Image (tube, rainbow, N blue to C red):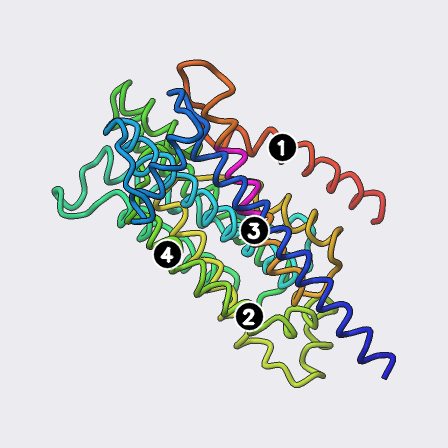
């Protein structure tokens, strides 16, 4: 009875925490919608959204209406989905690989997506029939297949998979650099560099619909395997002793993280360190249980990315920083602390 009451209390506490987190997420999205280079009154921002939802019919400046609905709101929502997806990937990979430094780009998916996108932007592969997103997605999947083959698929250990990811990153980064150096002009090189550092500037409602669908599917799959992820944290033998099909679960979860990361990178470019920072912060707040950790990572990652996007748009007047610069400024010190502590433990 005491154990049951404790479980009920923990679930109620988790529910309250997630409710407060969702409120914070809504406030962050509202801030992302209202804050920008163009000064728009708060009431105008509110009515621009409610008008399009059919709740009100207030006459507004068409430019303000378009900026709020077509640019800022869609951008904030895409940022939230991308942050949630990358944070989920980080939490899953850290458990599967049992490595505190693991994050979505450890598989080299980002580097592969960059090569695919650059091939479309500079080489013009597909003769206009293949879009930038499709090219990046194909490159990301090619990188994932390369890592799977190099690491012997599902039977690879944590260290071997990480080394395979490093090799894939170096290979595809070298290909990207070669394409830019030999085939691109100065303007193309500048555009590629900006894209590689991540940008939400080109996202609109179709990108939000795709990102939302992929993140929801990925979240549901990860939650289904939450118990297995708890077991993986203690090693493959412990997971197998609990009746978990280790190889099959690992393949499924690796595929889900690759799909999430590839979709996000194909839309907004390479954004690093979100999958590293957010899972550790969430684990510090709610503990290691993935039933609590995964929802917390999703919400916290969404909030983090929306706030980072606001900073990228406002920190410099008349300029927009690549979102990867902002996340790196937060992630690199965090990465250094984790690495330092790992060395002390070892």
- Left or right placement of residue 232 versus residue 219 in this view: right
Upstream in sequence: badge 2 or badge 1: 2
Query: Could you classify mark 2 by the number of other residues whose Cα lies within 10 Å: few (under 14), some (14-19), or many (20 or more)?
Result: many
Asked if 126 appears above or below 31 in the picture, the reply is below
Residue, disc 1? 330
Horizontal placement of 168 versus 234: left or right? left
**Mark 4 neighbour density, 10 Å: few (under 14) some (14–19) many (20 or more):** many
Q: Residues within 10 Å of mark 1 (few under 14, many from 20)?
A: some
Q: Using the rendered view, name the quadrant where residue 119 is placed.
A: top left
Q: Which residue is mark 4?
A: 141
Q: CA distance from mark 2 to mark 4?
A: 17 Å
**Are the residues tagged 3 and 1 within 8 Å (C-beta)?**
no
Q: Residue at x 34, y 41 (%)?
A: 115
- What separation in Å lies between label 4 and label 3 (alpha carbons)? 20 Å
Q: Residue furthest right?
A: 2
Q: Which mark is residue 250?
A: 2
Residue appearing at x 50%, y 34% in the figure:
31
Taking the magenta stretch, the answer to whether it contains residue 305 is: yes
Answer yes or no: is residue 198 visible.
yes
Horizontal side of 340 relative to 185 (left or right) equals right
Give the image quarter of residue 59.
top left
Q: Which residues are magenta?
A: 301-309
- Occupied quadrant, residue 173: top left
How many C-alpha atoms fall within 10 Å of the one at disc 3: few (<14), some, or many (≥20)? many
Nearest to the eye among marks 2 and 1: give it: 1
Report the label total.
4
Label 3's element? helix
Tell me: residue 258, above or below residue 44.
below
Q: Residue at x 21, y 36 (%)?
A: 123
Q: CA distance from mark 3 to mark 2?
A: 18 Å
């Amino acid at each position: 009875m005491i154990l049951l009451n404790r479980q009920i209390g923990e679930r109620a506490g988790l529910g309250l925490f997630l409710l407060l987190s969702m409120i914070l997420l809504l406030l962050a999205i509202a801030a992302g919608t209202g804050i920008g280079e163009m000064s728009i009154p708060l009431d105008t921002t509110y009515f621009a959204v409610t008008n399009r939802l059919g709740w009100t019919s207030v006459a507004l400046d068409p430019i303000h209406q378009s900026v709020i609905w077509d640019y800022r709101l869609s951008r904030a929502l895409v940022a939230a989905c991308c942050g949630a997806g990358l944070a989920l990937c980080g939490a899953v990979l850290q458990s599967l690989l049992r490595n505190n430094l693991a994050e979505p780009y450890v598989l080299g998916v980002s580097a592969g997506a960059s090569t695919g996108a650059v091939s479309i932007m500079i080489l013009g592969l597909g003769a206009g029939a293949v879009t930038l997103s499709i090219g990046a997605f194909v490159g990301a999947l090619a990188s994932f297949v390369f890592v799977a083959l190099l690491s012997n698929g599902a039977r690879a250990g944590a260290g071997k998979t990480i080394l395979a990811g490093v090799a894939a990153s170096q290979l595809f980064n070298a290909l990207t650099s070669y394409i830019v150096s030999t085939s691109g002009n100065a303007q193309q090189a500048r555009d590629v560099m900006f894209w590689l550092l991540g940008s939400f500037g080109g996202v609109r409602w179709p990108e939000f619909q795709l990102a939302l669908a992929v993140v929801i599917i990925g979240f549901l799959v990860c939650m289904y395997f939450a118990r297995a992820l708890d077991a993986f944290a203690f090693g493959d033998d412990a997971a197998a002793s609990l009746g978990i099909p280790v190889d099959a679960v690992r393949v499924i979860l690796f595929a889900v993280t690759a799909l999430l990361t590839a979709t996000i990178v194909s839309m907004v470019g390479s954004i690093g360190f979100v999958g590293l920072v957010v899972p550790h912060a969430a684990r510090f707040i709610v503990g290691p249980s993935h039933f609590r950790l995964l929802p917390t990572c999703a919400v916290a990652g969404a909030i983090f990315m929306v706030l980072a996007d606001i900073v990228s748009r406002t920190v410099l007047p008349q300029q927009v920083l690549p979102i990867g610069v902002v996340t790196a400024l937060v992630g690199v010190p965090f990465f250094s602390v984790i690495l330092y502590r790992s060395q002390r433990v070892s």
